[in-house]
Amino acid sequence: MPKLNINGGMIDVEVEDDTPLLWVIRDHVGLTGTKYGCGVAQCGACTVHIDGVATRSCALPVNAVGEDQKIVTIEGLGAKGLHPVQQAWAELDVAQCGYCQVGMIMAVSSLLAQNPRPTDDEIKAEITNICRCGTYTRVLAGVKLAAERMGASRG
Amino acid sequence: MSTMDRRIGNSARIEASRRAFVVGGLAGAFSLGFSLPAPEAALAQTASAPPEIGAWVVVQPDETVIIRVARAEMGQGTLTGLAQLVAEELECDWGNVRYEMVKPAENRARGRIWRDMSTGGSFGIRSSHAYVRAGGAAARLMLIQAAAESWKVNAGECRVERGVIHHPPTGRKATYGSVAAAAAKLSPPQNIALKDPNRWTIAGQPVKRLDTADKLDGSLVYGVDFKLPGMLIALPRACPVHGGKLVSFDAAAISGMRGVKHVLRVDDETVVVVADTFWRAKTALDALPIVWDEGPNANASSETIATTLREGLSAETRFIGNKVGDAQPALASGSDVYEADYSYPYQNHAQMEVLSATVRWSPERCDVWAPTQVAEAAHDTAASAAGVPTANCEIHTMRIGGSFGRRLSTDYIRMAVLIARQIPGVPVKMIWTREEDMAQGRFHPVTRARMRAKLGTDGTVEALHMRISGQSIAAYARPSAITENGDPFVFQGLTPVAPEGSFAYAIPNLLIDHAMRNPHIRPGFWRGVNTNHNAFYSECFIDELAHRAKQDPLDFRRRMMGGSPKHLAVLDAVADRVGWGNPAPDGIFRGIAQYMGFGSYTAAVAEVSVADGRLKMHRIVAATDPGHALNPQQIEAQVAGSFVYGLSAMLHGECTVKDGRIEQQNFDTYNVLRMDEMPAVEVIVMPSGGFWGGVGEPTIAVAAPAVLNAIFAATGKRIRDLPLKNTDLRVS
């Protein structure tokens, strides 16, 4: 039986090998913060971290994920208090309907972990998640605010 | 307000129906009803239900103020705006405010005390502001009265500050929470005066949304996330050719697949696979052999539809939206008549949350957990499909992951109930795949326009005929709205002076008419609705005429707008902000547009550059006059979001038809605007007072024409067919 390391815990999942990680997380593990938007890795609503890297889980078969790989979902990101990206999002009232924002937050938090001071062009190139409400202006501002805060806390 | 008074005064009906009103998650509070004796059952209820002061406000002993919201929240911020209006009149501490969504069966059981629950046409706030404010004011007066009675003082001597009642002559004070119990026993006031908006301290302020926290940590349960014990997952597939039929399906071919529980006919065009998980249902559905009768539209295509619409460009019609003087003789013939044809394609809403509904059905009762923009219509649809009385059916309304008009239709509610009805007692969550959502949309209608005009010797427009040919949304979605003059929605923003939207230009000979041509693709109300193409046609053609008259596009417009001061004010505001009279930076070109829709005045200037055929949108300056600005920072968010929606349509949005069906199946073929294409948007919110306009939709209209007019300035190329992706800007 495959095992997955999700949000720091090992979970047995008894599913078909081709089941996308998204549906394992949502239907078998029961965590619904990670969203279905397209199923073809286009929109990014399903973004999770795998070993810290933002990954679109809707088109990733579960058998491609090893037991030693650490999966973090939105439920795990802020488990010890809101992540600076979540704080920035709250401060700037970024979300409208909110459906894509969990994926946005996962993509942005991964970006900032790898590139603490991204330029506008780097942010636009890296964050390709779809938001139909059109929150992009505030997403951009939110990335920069979170980067600033994280930079300050690193001293 | 007087109607509100009557409703509050009708305490017998309220008391009788209050028994049915159950609020989750508020145990431990106690309920306060009105002054009539309550039956024992209701008394039992009062031990655990919250204290209600009027229909809109609940005040708990810990000072928490719960404001009831009857309209749908799908990202547009109506929930927060309505709460601001109630809180303003209530004069409570905004920091203590929470919200609660109303349900339609409750609303009906209480004589529609929360009135209309539909949310569309940018009407959420502007059609309910007066009565929700009255609801807040009534509660405030009752709370003050309760305090005054306990102090044996005159209520008129009391004042309220952030949820604390003061009696200055005696120095007494009491919190709302401490007097809520007594307040709810009082008779409601009969005469309620609302505050002058100039005195607002909560409404009109850029307060943060009330509904953000659970969107940031994944805890918000959207319709697709909802779960019940023992629930099954249902994935439907309807005939991809609209109007076609389901002939048969081979259930035996997939019945042994893991997790599959049922394979069912839903109606005469839909089959569904019901399984224990989404992926197992999808795997089985994709393997299910299905035979369709695609019907008479099996050979329809974008080209056959275009041919039908082109015929309408010159056909006779009696559907007239605006007529001044006599345009047709002036435009009858002659080389000085300037003519151009435009077209606008089908588009899918492509809201991020696909359609879903969870239903638990029994012969006696039907419960539906679903997002909807029309809770009461969904309630009717569900009860009818369930075969139960509406009183035994409830729509448990949910916050929505984007909608843009898609959930003004209740097709998916009906479908989910018809599925669950075949599996009594078992909760079933129906989810549409993105592919199903793309195939079975309620599409932005397809239209074309023929614009014909003649310039006078003084360079003004002497005559203009705008012929729209194409699809009526109402003919499909709201046939009762069709009159002998056709579909009234078709002329949004083009009619003579009207509160919803009026044509700004004084033209001595003007004719705007519509030849209705309805292809088989099912249309729907799509954010901005008919203003999207109407503004594209009229504002780009006016720009063409300005260039033909060798006039500045702003000056050319201004000369015709003397009778439209509010249209002119927003136009001037964007021109001033951008410095229209001064040269743009090197390589940057500007375009301008104005339009009125959904009761608000909007204008925009776009600054773009085009290099090697590549468009870059640098900056948009947009202005809106919605009459009253309830939450300026949320208006700014809606305007910026409107540009994303409108520019996404302009750049990429197109659903084409082949073999009778929509060709695009997902975001890989139906591209939408992402952050890398997003221009900077500067928003000027300029409420002039005296009216209430919408916010969620109006500014979409000016997005495309402003940018397209700027592209013309940059390239000399006039874009008359959308989306832009089909045009090579390198070719002149």
Image (cartoon, helix red, strand yellow):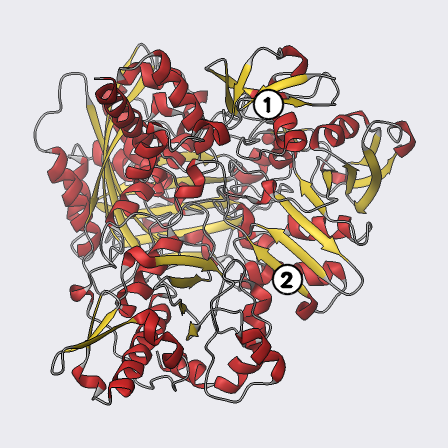
Q: Quadrant of the N terminus of chain B?
A: bottom left
Secondary element at image label 2? strand
Pick the front one: B249 or B231: B231
Q: Quadrant of the C terminus of chain B?
A: top left
Residue B139 placement: quadrant = bottom left
Give me the chain letter of mark 2.
B
Asked if B662 appears above or below A109 in the picture, the reply is below
Q: Residues within 10 Å of mark 2 (few under 14, many from 20)?
A: many
Pick the front one: B319 or B416: B416
Label at residue B394: 2
Provide residue B564's location: percent of width, then percent of height: 20, 56
Q: Residues within 10 Å of mark 1 (few under 14, many from 20)?
A: many
- Alpha carbons under labels 1 and 2: distance apart: 33 Å
- Name the residue carrying label 1: A58
Secondary element at image label 1? helix
Provide residue B148's location: percent of width, then percent of height: 25, 84
* Residue at image point 43% right, 54% down: B121
Provide residue B491's location: percent of width, then percent of height: 42, 53
| Residue B198 in sight from this viewpoint | yes
Q: Which amino acid type is marked by label 2?
A: Glu
Numbered disc total? 2
